[in-house]
Amino acid sequence: MLFPTLEFALFFFLLFPLYWLVKDKSVLRKGLLIVASYFFYGYWDVRFIFLLFLSSLINWLVGLKAEKRLILALGVGLNLSILFFFKYADFLIRSLNNLLLQQGREILLKPMGLILPVGISFFTFQGISYIVDVHRGDTEKRSRFSDILLYISFFPQLVAGPILRSDVFLPQIDRTPDPSSLNIGFALRKIFSGLFKKIVIANYLASLAADPAFLNPGDYGSWELLFAAYAYGVQIFCDFSAYSDIAIGVANLLGFHFPENFDKPYRSSSLKEFWRRWHISLSSWLRDYLYIPLGGSRKGKGRTYLNLFLTMLLGGIWHGAGWNFVLWGCIHGFWLIGERLIIKKSASTMTGRLVGRIITFHVVTAAWIFFRAPDFPLALNYFQGLFAFRPGWTMITPFTGLLLFIGIALHFIPPQWEKGLENGINRLSAFFTALFSGLYFILLQILAPEGMAPFIYFQF
């Protein structure tokens, strides 16, 4: 089930009043959210609700004894084994077969044709964070299975994040939600902005620029390929941050408060700053559960550089089974190391920050080419086309240029403008809030391209 669809609107329209009717009854309230979350996930493919249930069961049982190192290791191993099987088994089989064919030997195994369950990387990381936090004493173990069922499956962030920590989410399900504490203006601002970024900016830039260029880069001129690379950078930001925005807004309407997942990443003046602003829940997860346990920066410069590289390499592998994702992670790892070697202090002048933003944006954009390309050879063809100086301008139109400009301009909207919009919505009566929301959704449907592409991060 996709957020910007009539199906989700009807789903939430039915859930919202039911939820607030049973808000004082803890068992009913949690049960309703669990049933709704499993329906939301099963709407895509009912078979995989059993996998979601299995993940919850494993992490609940491990959490009960997670203070024991052996039990914790078993739990982490089971989580990663499930993720590895669905995400990487066929990739390894194909890689082995290619190696055997190059050596003139027979193929041993055929790929299994596994379907990647939507959101498996996200709910797996949530499960791991719960049992690790219980082991560390950072969160209390939960004896009630229903608590972990809800934590792993809560529908707003289930399939594409943000990745929630148990110490953020679980205490919220223990409290009776208070409708008077809802910030309708904040929730609707997040939902409205998310829908606009996804339906208008991301979908049009995908269909008019990024998708055609990455399908066959040889058909386009060098300036068009450069434009399409920029377009994909804006597309993936608008697409992914849109899901997080809508998830945060929808959860807020149910009385839950999620941390921000994106903080204007393309205004970063270094790659280090970029990763503090981009997909914050993943970058903080990698820091707390991988980089720091590896030793972080506590064991000398050489070990720090190695830990940075391994963290970004594994972050690349987390995103997908392909050598292009491996290289994407390597680019980020090497550049982070290079920044530490070359830049001793952050640029504090306006000119220094501007130069840093331009360089960082182009490093990130170049890495996105490997991330977006369906395979490594096509990524190389894309770069060859960029530097071939072929003519061609048809892709670059006033409309696509305007979308690209808006996508970048979103990073420089003053916070007080956002707050002003929230306050304006909060001052409206319930009737005018509903009327304004309805008119906005109708306008988006008029502006939207035909069809509704899935969110990019569903594939991860």
Image (cartoon, rainbow, N blue to C red):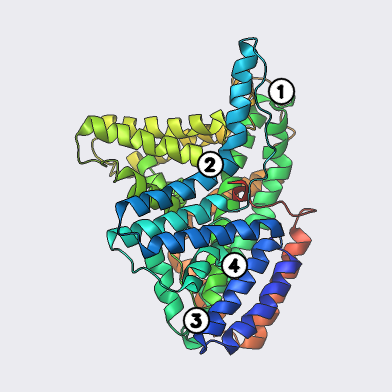
User: In the figure, 223 relative to 180: above or below?
Assistant: above
Residue 146 horizontal side relative to residue 286, left or right: right
Q: Secondary structure at mark 4?
A: helix
Label 1 to label 4: alpha-carbon separation: 38 Å
Which residue is tagged 1?
218
Q: Quadrant of residue 250?
A: bottom right
Q: Amino acid at mark 4?
A: Ile
Q: Quadrant of residue 51?
A: bottom right
Of the numbered discs 4 and 3, the one sitting upstream in the chain is 3
User: In the figure, 353 relative to 24: above or below?
Assistant: above
Label 3 to label 1: alpha-carbon separation: 52 Å
Are dots 1 and 4 in contact, CB under 8 Å?
Answer: no
Question: In front of the other: label 3 or label 1?
Answer: 3
Which residue is tagged 3?
182
Which residue is tagged 2?
84
Label 4 to label 3: alpha-carbon separation: 14 Å
Q: Could you tell me if residue 47 is visible in this image? A: yes
Q: Amino acid at mark 1?
A: Gly
Between residue 258 and residue 78, name the one nearer to us: 78
Label 3 to label 2: alpha-carbon separation: 40 Å
Q: Secondary structure at mark 2?
A: helix
Which residue is at a point 62% across and 59% down the rendered structure image? 50
Between residue 306 and residue 278, name the one nearer to us: 306
Residue 49 horizontal side relative to residue 131, left or right: right
Q: Could you tell me if residue 406 is visible in this image? A: no
Of the numbered discs 2 and 1, the one sitting upstream in the chain is 2
Task: Tell me where residue 372 appears, x and y as whole percent.
Answer: 60, 36
Which residue is at a point 65% across and 48% down the rendered structure image? 402
Residue occupying the far top of the picture: 104
Of the numbered discs 3 and 2, the one sitting upstream in the chain is 2
Task: Tell me where residue 355 appears, x and y as whole percent.
Answer: 39, 37
Disc assigned to residue 191? 4
